[in-house]
Amino acid sequence: MGHPHLREVAAPVPVEMIGTPEMELLLADMHDTLEDYGGIGLAAPQIDVPLRIAIIEIPAGPTRYGELEALPLTAFINPTIEVLNPAAAGNWEGCLSVPGLRGWVERPQHIRVTYTGTDGASRELELTGFPATVFQHEFDHLDGTLYVDRITDSTKLVFEEELARFGAKD
Ligand code: NI
């Protein structure tokens, strides 16, 4: 946070880049970074690549966000979100680009994602609950938005270790 590139609107991925060795390298680099961080999602601008790509991988078993429904590693190229139900719920979000902190952010919990897959095919995915939050967080990065921008109560921006120590007061 503070690097100007995190605040820029990323460019659409050119169709001709999909499936190239350059794209494979980028996706591998993103996956390595995600695994090093122990996160569940990463957007290309977070590794200083200004393109509209995010990856999400929710492993089976415990994560830094508790036990979640698993989602295999998937790359989302040029994704868009349609909110199917604006009813929002809050979560303690964290971010590789905002280390050591967590913030309470409320987002719609029912969305449809349209994106291009790594094979160039157009795909759709309907999401509810926490995964809907994860996708909105990652896709925000493609527009230069960080979760801290969406915190409406600044008392709910906290250090991770204090959150672990004192617990969450919603
Ligand atoms: Ni993030």
Image: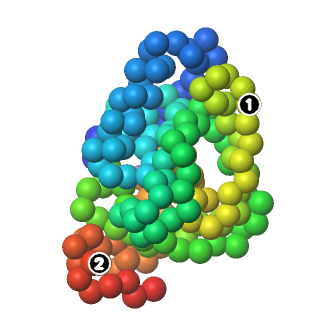
Reply above or below: 116 against 20: below
Reply above or below: 117 against 102: above
Direction from residue 32 to residue 76 in the image, left or right: right
The residue located at (40%, 88%) in the rendering is 169
The residue located at (34%, 67%) in the rendering is 102
The residue located at (68%, 57%) in the rendering is 127
Three-letter code for the amino acid on which mark 2 is drawn: Leu
Residue highlighted by disc 1: 122
Direction from residue 76 to residue 149 in the image, left or right: left
The residue located at (58%, 37%) in the rendering is 76
Tag count in the figure? 2
Q: Measuring from the top left, give residue 147's x and y in whole percent.
A: 44, 59
**Figure quadrant of the C terminus:** bottom left
Three-letter code for the amino acid on which mark 1 is drawn: Ser
Closer to us: 119 or 82: 119
Residue highlighted by disc 2: 163
